[in-house]
Structures are given as C-alpha cells and as structure tokens.
Image (spheres, helix red, strand yellow):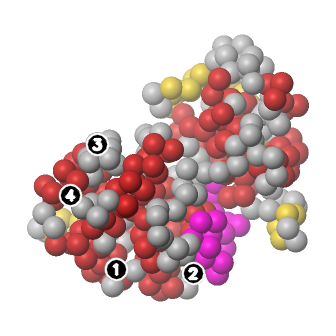
Amino acid sequence: MECKIDDERGKRVAQLLYESFGTAGILGKTAMPEDALPDSVKTGSLEHLLFLTLTVSIDYQRDAPALWESSRKTFEDPETRYLFDPKALNEIPMGKIIEDMQKYNLSKKPRKDASIWRTIGTSIYKKWSGDPRNFIEHCNCDSLIILERLRNEIHVCNGRNFADYPYLRGPKIAPLWLRILRDNAKIAQLKNLEKVPIPVDIHVARATLATGVVTGRFKGRLDELFECIREAWFKSVEGLTIESRPMIALDVDEPLWHLSKYGCSYRDKQTGYCPNINRCEAKAFCIMGTIKIGNGLVELET
C-alpha cells in the first residue's frame, strides 16, 4: 500500500472547513443528523444522553439522517418510548424489542440491531443504574479510559464472554460517541479528547482522499486506509488554534462528513470531476484522479 500524508495541506483544509462549517456551512449545510432533539427532551438530560448513546450504537452501514429521524419518531411514540429506558430493555422480551424497533425503521438488521441495543441498555442498567453519566464519571471523564473500558468490559452469559457495549466500542462509533457527548450532550469536562482519533467512516475517508490530504496508489479494503487517515488528521491539526483553544482531530469530523455527503460523493469516480465544485468551499483542494469507494473496497490513484 502506498499512502502519503500531506499534513501542511491538511492544516489548510482543516482551518477552511472548520470556519466554513461554523458560518455559512459546507455546501449550505450546517446541521448534523444527530442535532435535532426529540420533542420535550432537554439538551444534556438523562433522556437526551440515552437517546444519543443508543442511537449511535447502531450507526453502521446506515444513512445517518434516516437513522436519527427513525430514532426520534421511535422516542416520540408513547408505545415505543420504552426502548430508551435501560430498565425496560432489561425486562422486556427480545421478541417485542425486535418488533418495536421496526415500527419506524429504527433497525435495519432486526435481530442484530435489537441485540446491540438491548445489550448496551442492559449493561447501562445493571452496571450504572441506568445512567451513562455514571460510567463516564467512573472513568474520571477521561476519554482514553472511556475508550479502553468500552473495548474491554464484558459480562458472562451461559459460560461465555460477551461485550458490554457491542458496536459502541468500535473504532468508528466509540470516538463518534465521545464527540457527540461533547457537542450534543454538552459534557464539557471530558479530558484527553485531543488524543481521540477522528471517527473514520466512508464520508470522512472520501473527503480526506478527495482533498488530497492523503494520496497514493491503492486497491483493496477501505478500512486498510483508516489508520493512515487517522494519523493524517492528528498531524494536520497540530499547532492550529480555534476559539482560543487547540484544534483537535474531532473538530474536523463534522465538516469532512458534510463535504463528502453533499459534495465529494458526486465526483466522477474515475476522473475526479465534481459537478458541485463551483459552489464547494474546498474547491481549491479538490484533486483529480481515481477514488472509487463501495462495498467496503477502495481503488485509489491520486
């Protein structure tokens, strides 16, 4: 694999996208799918935190706007509201959870998604009295401890070990959850966020490649590029300052996601021509060349 990081270019891209996202937006978009609260829910409340935590846990291979809209509808319906109550998730049969998660298309893979959802809810109920904030505080609000415990904490069932936080502990979703805790739940006391890698998904990967922050020649699994992309953004934000604090890799997650979803996703996979280039904030950094991404595979020649 040939992979080259241009962190000086990355610094310019990071500054541009962050400033654009905070003002006029990226291609006119300024809000993330998780930003809208369910009716009657207050920012930072326990209900809000459970809504965010459970929903993000099944944010894999999904259209994010559709997922979060389905979750809001599920929360707002009195008949399915219990799905966000850890105590109820511990007590109600799996069959009903599977059925009710399908009412508003909350689950795409009914059994798998319901198992993830219920396991996390039950772990929060049994270990943290139904409140994720107790887990966060028990980790001393240290992001690195949170990541480590998400990965490693288990429970035993019928003599077998099972993860307490399936998928929430993953290399994309765990950092994404931490960013959402900071940006949406407004948990300001989280420490060591600067050491948390950017949550790389198809959009962050595509935008990173399309802006030339990572270039090279490669054909294979997309996730083989993820570590290079994480390293690229750690390096690119070094020395940058925003709002009187150091910029961190998590700060460019939302702008990159928007750039890809509403811009780079439309570029010609072979040539790199993008029909949105004239109205794109990052047009000065758009590079030509082959960037084909699909079915977990990538072909890169830039």
Counting every numbered tag in the picture gives: 4
Residue assigned mark 1: 130
Of the image marks 4 and 3, the number of the one nearer the N terminus: 4
For label 2, the SS is loop
Q: Is residue 91 left or right of residue 117?
A: left
Q: Amino acid at mark 4?
A: Ile
Residue assigned mark 2: 141
Of the image marks 3 and 2, the number of the one nearer the N terminus: 3
Circle on res. 58: none
For label 1, the SS is loop
Q: Main secondary structure of the magenta part?
A: loop
Marks 3 and 2, how far apart at CA:
33 Å
- Write the start and end of the magenta stretch as one range: 182-198
The image shows residue 9 at horizontal and vertical percentages of 86, 41
Q: Amino acid at mark 2?
A: Cys
Q: Is residue 284 above or below residue 231?
A: above
> Where is residue 158, by image quadrant?
bottom left
Q: Are marks 3 and 2 in contact (CB under 8 Å)?
A: no
